[in-house]
Image (tube, rainbow, N blue to C red):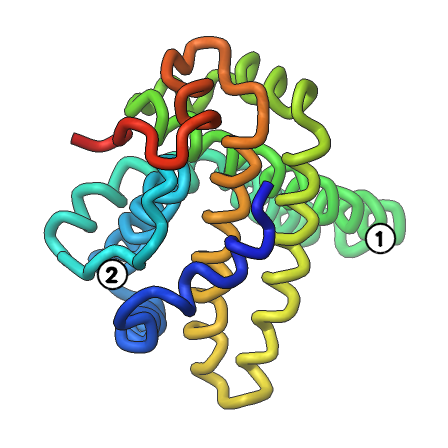
Amino acid sequence: MNIERSFRFAFKSPGAIGKMALGGLFSLLFFTVFFPIVVMGYMMRVLCDALEGRDAKLPDWSLGELFNEGLMPILVVLAYSSPLIALMILEQILIALFGLSIPLSILFLLLHLVVPVALSILVPIALIRFAVKRSMKAAFDFGEIIGFIKKNKGPFFTAWGLSFAVGAVSSIGLFVFVVGIFFTNFIAGLITMHLYASAYRASTPFSDDKDGKLRSSMAIPPPLRS
């Protein structure tokens, strides 16, 4: 893994300040349907470029294309998030019916810790599988996803731990000014996507990723996107 490159690539990109400022602005418009999907499309381009070793510059902002590229991945994220949403709904129902007892509080505290951690482990690999296979079905192939994690604990959990730390540091945006969190979170997202792409290239690829070894061995391997 080239960890240093993951932290530096975005800032060394031509026009980096303008591109990241737009990313923060579009992230700020989270209440729209359009811009969260556009930002997801941008993150997926960063992921694909890093997987291909074509990360010398950040992608350009082309809203229509990015919307199309972000639509399926954001559905993947929402599908994976559904257990957490269901958990919160169930919690409110049980509290309304039985009150907030100590055993119930402990149970939901544990679930609110375990479920997000599980999602933080599964979702990045699911998005990489989607990028590699261009298939919603592939993103939910838990056998491949869990098998990959088991075979590549070193690079994967290095990326996972660093991504967690980057996300924690990005919360400093709240203390700069309230909307700053959207800009710092966007930059953290860029770094996170690059970290996971770097981890994948340093790992044994999915068993059905025909070009996986090629991507690992070449500085500029064949593109994932046409």
Q: Is residue 149 visible?
A: yes
| N-term-proximal mark, 2 vs 1 | 2
Going 41% across and 26% down the picture, which residue do you hit? 215
Mark 2 element type = helix
Going 49% across and 85% down the picture, which residue do you hit? 178
- Residue closest to the eye, 10 or 207: 10
Going 46% across and 18% down the picture, which residue do you hit? 213
- Up/down of 10 relative to 201, above or below: below
Mark 1 element type = loop
Quarter of the figure with the N terminus:
top right
Q: Specify whether 58 is left or right of 108.
A: left
Going 59% across and 20% down the picture, which residue do you hit? 148
Q: Which residue is mark 2?
A: 35
Q: Of tags 2 and 1, which is closer to the observer?
A: 2
- Residue closest to the eye, 18 or 165: 18
- Up/down of 217 relative to 14, above or below: above
- Residue closest to the eye, 51 or 30: 51
- x then y, percent, for residue 217: 46, 25
Q: Specify whether 66 is left or right of 207.
A: left
- x then y, percent, for residue 56: 34, 54
Q: Specify whether 202 is left or right of 95.
A: left
How many residues crowd around disc 1 within 10 Å: few (fewer than 14), some, or many (20 or more)?
few
Q: Quadrant location of residue 20?
A: bottom left
Q: Which residue is mark 1?
A: 101
- x then y, percent, for residue 197: 48, 39
**Type of amino acid at the residue the image marks with label 1:** Ser
